[in-house]
Image (cartoon, helix red, strand yellow):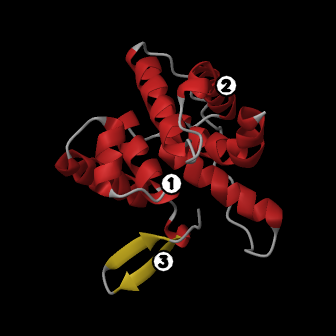
Amino acid sequence: MDFVDFVRRRGDRHLHTAVLLTGDWQAAQDLTQAALTELYRVWERLDTGTEPDAYLRRIMVNTRRSWWRARWRRETPLAEIPDRGSADDAADRHAVAEVVRQALRSLPPRQRTALVLRYFEDLSEAQTAELMRISVGSVKTHAHRGLAALRASLPKDLLVVVNEGTERGGVER
């Protein structure tokens, strides 16, 4: 019953992480299902006194990495990028989110993984490095290059000027 409670409480959060890691809802559902199946197999041996989120994230990253190595990718390009609408309209927010997801899908897998873990999951560079099994310096490099690629690929009206000459992605998580 503890496992079912965990999935009910945290399943959606991990599905959203999987969407960002894979760039595709169907692949994210497959990844989440595979990771939860693996977690269920070891649930009895886990210390469930603490939240097993970190363990599930590790399973997701490792599973995604193995799928990527096997060239198991399902990217679905869009014919047209949706126009940005008013911030008050939910449909427009979803369109903006789709533009950002599409830009994330265009990134190489390691850059995308570094950005998702650092900025969506809000993990430290050290935690991200541990999960990705790379050095902290590599995390910084992948995140820097990924952010630069996102800035270059996102429409200029989605970017917010922070300082003169500096732009940042202006979309919320």
| Front-most of residues 26 and 151 | 26
Give, as a three-letter code, the residue at label 3.
Answer: Val
Residue at 37 percent of width and 47 percent of height:
114
- Which residue is disc 1 drawn over? 121
Q: Position of residue 78 (x, y in %)?
A: 64, 38
Q: Residue furthest bottom?
A: 164
Q: Please tell me whether mark 1 sits on a helix, a strand or a loop.
A: loop
Secondary element under disc 2, as helix, strand or loop, is: helix
The answer to whether residue 80 of the structure is visible from this angle is no
Q: Identify the residue shown where x is 55% and y is 44%.
A: 53
Q: Are marks 1 and 3 in contact (CB under 8 Å)?
A: no
The kind of residue on which mark 2 rests is Gln
The answer to whether residue 128 is left or right of residue 56 is left
Q: Position of residue 68 (x, y in %)?
A: 43, 22
Determine whether, in the image, residue 43 is placed left or right of residue 54: right
Q: Is residue 32 visible?
A: yes
| Residue designated by label 2 | 33
